[in-house]
């Protein structure tokens, strides 16, 4: 599991470094003129389609030497709708809170390029850029070129990346209930019996809840393949047309930062985890599942591997799950 942690205070220092350092550097991204710039990536973990890559770009020139005119960023692959750059710069107040200060007009997207035009006379700014990863980038790499332009025409650029975009798919907040209990890994969705009967070749898991404590069995919230032993399906209606099988393994303690709104522990399931995990020979059921637990799953045909995270469970039947899926072929 990839564990990625870094100090967030770097972003706070970024603007200060630029405001105090104006001499030319050997870095290819620096110029021999008065403009200087730096950039950092603030998002953690693997880059998943539909999520954001969040970068912070700072630009500055010595006080009294001129003013900034515009800031642009061009992605090697155009971002999905929702890609934008803030037209606010920020300062941190005495309480440690970031306070926005409008410095430009709202950003404008033109293909793969996003632009903010400054509307105030300023020689320094730090702008935040949010790139929504598009489907076109799945399994590819994306890079970014930031460019600051001064009113006198001087420009300076800074390149970021390339960043690998995951092949995995993700779906959050799938509701389960006593009736919505037939799960498709391919669709990353849960269905009622009436719905599932129309797509039996897509149903990989059945969900049910049973209280068997009086019989000495911690059955509880259970997930099982449609072809699992009837002991684990416990009178749940499973049509004979549902014949798919899976390998399953319980997992505790993996709170994937993408699948939950829990505090970010810097833990993420990456493509490499799906590629290397071994599930052959595992059972086709998991009983007595708990909140914040999960299951590794591989379909018996080898087409999909998945991680199913349990966001919440009721004290009776029902709950919310999220899924990451990886296509093996």
Image: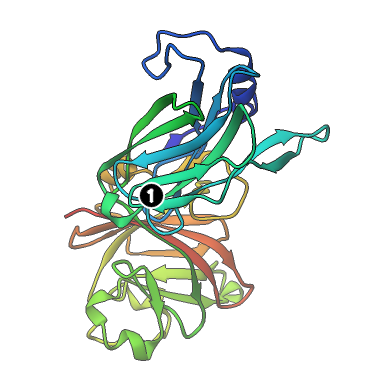
Residue 319 appears left or right of 94: left
- Residue designated by label 1: 48
The colour mode here is rainbow
Residue in the picture at 47% in, 56% down: 294
Residue 183: image location, x then y, percent = 37, 73
Under circle 1, the secondary element is loop
Quarter of the figure that contains the C terminus? bottom left
Quarter of the figure that contains the N terminus? top left
Residue 288: image location, x then y, percent = 52, 64
**On screen, residue 292 above or below 35:** below
**On screen, residue 136 above or below 23:** below
**On screen, residue 144 above or below 253:** above
Residue 326: image location, x then y, percent = 29, 54
Query: Is residue 152 in view?
Result: yes
**On screen, residue 47 above or below 308:** above
Residue 193: image location, x then y, percent = 37, 88
Residue 100 appears left or right of 60: right
The front one of 28 and 202 is 28
The front one of 41 and 146 is 146
Query: Is residue 219 in view?
Result: no
- Labels in figure, total: 1
Residue furthest to the right: 94
Residue furthest to the front: 152
Residue in the picture at 41% in, 59% down: 81
The front one of 60 and 174 is 60
Estimate how packed mark 1 is, as few (under 14), some (14 to 19) or many (20 or more) residues with alpha carbons within 10 Å: many
Residue in the picture at 50% in, 37% down: 70
Residue 257 appears left or right of 139: right
The front one of 241 and 66 is 66
């Amino acid at each position: 599991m990839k564990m990625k942690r870094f100090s967030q205070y770097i972003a706070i220092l970024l603007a200060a470094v630029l405001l105090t350092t104006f001499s030319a550097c050997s870095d290819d991204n620096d110029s021999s003129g008065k403009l200087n710039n730096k950039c950092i990536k603030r998002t953690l973990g693997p880059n998943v389609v539909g999520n954001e890559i969040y970068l912070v770009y700072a630009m500055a020139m010595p006080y009294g030497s001129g003013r900034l005119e515009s800031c642009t960023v061009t992605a090697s692959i155009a971002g999905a709708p929702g890609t934008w750059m803030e037209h606010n710069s920020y300062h941190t107040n005495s309480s440690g809170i970031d306070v926005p200060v409008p410095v430009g007009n709202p950003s404008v997207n033109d293909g793969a390029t996003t632009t903010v035009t400054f509307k105030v006379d300023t020689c320094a700014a730090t702008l935040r850029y949010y790139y929504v990863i598009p489907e076109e980038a799945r399994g590819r790499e994306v890079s970014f070129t930031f460019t600051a332009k001064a009113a006198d025409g001087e420009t300076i650029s800074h390149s970021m990346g390339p960043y690998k975009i995951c092949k995995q798919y993700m779906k959050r907040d799938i509701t389960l209930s006593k009736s919505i209990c037939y799960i498709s890994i391919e669709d990353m969705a849960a269905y009622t019996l009436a719905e599932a009967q129309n797509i039996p070749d897509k149903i990989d898991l059945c969900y049910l809840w049973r209280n068997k404590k009086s019989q000495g069995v911690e059955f509880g919230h259970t997930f099982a393949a449609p072809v699992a032993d009837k002991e684990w399906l416990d009178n749940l209606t499973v049509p004979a047309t549902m014949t798919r099988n899976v390998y399953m393994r319980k997992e505790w303690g993996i709170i994937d930062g993408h699948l939950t709104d829990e505090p970010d522990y810097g833990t993420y399931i990456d493509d490499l985890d799906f590629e290397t995990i071994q599930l052959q020979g595992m059972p086709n059921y998991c009983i007595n599942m708990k909140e914040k637990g999960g299951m590794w799953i591989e379909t018996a045909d080898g087409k999909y591997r998945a991680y199913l995270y349990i966001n919440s469970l009721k004290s009776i039947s029902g709950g919310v799950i999220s899924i990451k899926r990886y296509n093996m072929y």
